[in-house]
Image (cartoon, grey):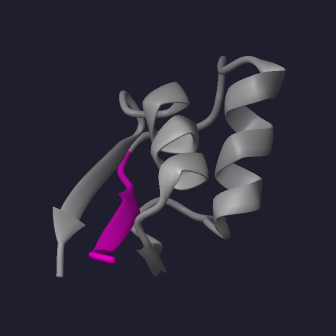
Amino acid sequence: MAKVKITLKRSLIGQGHKSRETIKSLGLKKINSSVERELDNSLEGMLNVVKHLVIIEKV
């Protein structure tokens, strides 16, 4: 499977509960924090929820 680098680029202020919990489950805490994860179906679903808050790059 492909690896992706996920970077939080926008603040969570004003975001709903679902977006906040999704960002937390991805392992992102502060703006500009990044994680590398294996891309699978569940991760694609989480990224679809928060696509307006993060930048996704293939590694």
How many marks are shown on the rendered structure? 0
In percent of the image, x 61 and y 65: which residue is there?
A: 28
x, y percent for residue 38: 44, 76
In percent of the image, x 48 and y 60: which residue is there?
A: 40
Nearest the viewer among 25 and 31 is: 25
Q: In which quarter of the image is the C terminus?
A: bottom left
Q: Quadrant of the N terminus?
A: bottom left
| Magenta span contains residue 5 | yes
Q: Is residue 10 left or right of residue 1?
A: right
Q: In this view, does 1 lie above or below 31?
A: below
Looking at the rendering, the stretch of residues picked out in magenta corresponds to: 1-9
x, y percent for residue 46: 58, 41
The secondary structure making up most of the magenta span is strand
x, y percent for residue 20: 74, 37
In percent of the image, x 54 and y 53: which residue is there?
A: 43
Nearest the viewer among 21 and 13 is: 21
In percent of the image, x 67 and y 30: which residue is there?
A: 19
Q: Is residue 16 above or below residue 6?
A: above
Which quadrant holds residue 17? Answer: top right
